[in-house]
Amino acid sequence: MIDMTRVLADTPGAAGRIFLNSAGSSLMPAPVLAEVLGHLRRETEIGGYEAADEREADREAGYGVFAELLGCRPDQVAFTDSATRSWLAALDAVPLAAGDRILVGEVEYGGNAIALLMRAQAVGATVEVVPSDADGTFSDEALKAMLDERVKLVSVVHVPTNGGIIADVRRISDTVHANSDALVLLDACQAVGQLAVDAEALDADILTGTGRKWLRAPRGTGFLVVRDRAKAILRPKLADLQGGTWTGPDSYVLRDDARVYELWECDNAGRLGLIAAARYLLELGPAAVEHEVTRRGAHLRAALAEIPGVTVHDLGARKSGLVTFSVAGKAAADVQAALARRDIAVSVSHRSSTVYDMTRRGLSEIVRASPHYFVTEAQLDVAAGAVAELAREGGV
Ligand SMILES: *Cc1c(COP(=O)(O)O)cnc(C)c1O
């Protein structure tokens, strides 16, 4: 059970509006904001290096906090400035040669896909899409049939940016590992903070995520987990004096842990905020959060599905807190704007973010509502009522 009184007291923005965009960038809770502002103030008072030195132990403790949150060891954690930065660092370090194959799912994220295509085209590798099963997750049979020794990487999106699917990550990892030496790269960007995510239980070799979405951390923060199988295979390409040490005019040594993927410079206020957000989540309990978010997603989805003229687009046997829909006769941006006028925040997901998936489903844009645990059921009902009004205007 989540202490809603505490949560709402920590989230003043949740009272004045119906905030359904935690899949975009959520509302930071008060302890996170206090950490960020406090550190910025301290930098102003005594200087950036001095302020960082004061919080050295806390920054170091952050690796342990994320290890606890994500089911890995502290030395397997790196901090970055976004999920994509983490993902690119990992992709860049995967040894790839002409003829190698990379497998992705149909809900692959645009930011990942562009980089994959660039890298594959540069080396002469191929990017191939694994067909989905009826639940929208990797078809096990298709995946098995596609795996061979030339597959070096399988990119799995835990929860896509444009829908409710929760991938069956463990089943996918098991199939990949039983049938190839490929690494499983898990984009957990939309999962961490709404679902309990355990890298070891999921047997993902690499995991990436962001601060600003469900984790409720500041923007410009991200994290990377590199587990041992990946560490043995990955070859970091470019490090600075965080990732390495310049030992002589022609020599350097690289760090032996995941921080080889970090750069020396970072936004320390943001980093401390990220760590505070993870602590906040651990206090609430990731399993309790998962329960509450999933419940809210299901509640809103059911309410929207009953409205004439509204189509809910979510696939998946198990569904997350991302709820996607369209209103007949209304452009997604118009729905978003009309809801914004009623202080209801949603976002729009365009085809270009998930080209494989939207193309196959014949969709060009959908409205995305993503309620976190701080949204009340009454607020969800008000939001559904507002959508119903729009649907009536839409002439249905
Ligand atoms: C938002 C998102 C990303 C990118 O996260 P950034 O922090 O913007 O880099 C990656 N994958 C998925 C599925 C996303 O929804």
Image: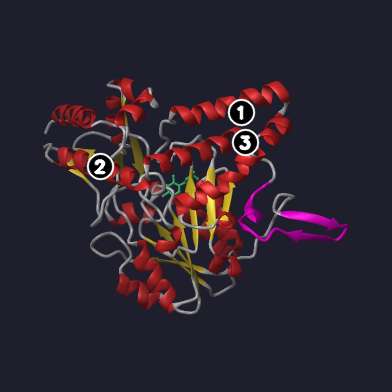
User: Colour mode?
Assistant: secondary structure
Q: CA distance from mark 2 to mark 3?
A: 33 Å
Q: Earlier in the sequence, mark 2 or mark 3?
A: 3
Instruction: Tell me the quarter of the image containing the N terminus.
Output: top left
Q: SS class of the residue under badge 1?
A: helix
Which residue in the structure is indicated by mark 1? 39
The circle on residue 193 is none
CB atoms at circles 1 and 2 under 8 Å apart? no
Dot 2, crowdedness within 10 Å: few (<14), some or many (≥20)? many
Three-letter code for the amino acid on which mark 2 is drawn: Gly
Q: Position of residue 203 (x, y in %)?
A: 43, 65
Q: Is residue 387 above or below residue 296?
A: above
Quarter of image, res 229: bottom right
Q: Is residue 252 magenta?
A: yes
* Residue at mark 2: 297
Which is more N-terminal, label 2 or label 1?
Answer: 1
Q: CA distance from mark 1 to mark 2?
A: 35 Å
Quadrant where the C terminus is found in the figure: top left
* Residue at image point 69% right, 53% down: 243
Point out the tag, 1 or 3, that comes first from the N-terminus.
1
The residue singled out by tag 3 in the image is 267
- Give residue 89's position: percent from left, percent from top: 59, 55
Instruction: Identify the residue at horizontal 83%, vertical 57% (top origin).
Output: 247
- Whether residue 93 is visible: yes
User: Which span of residues is magenta-colored?
Assistant: 244-263
Instruction: Look at label 1 and name its amino acid.
Output: His
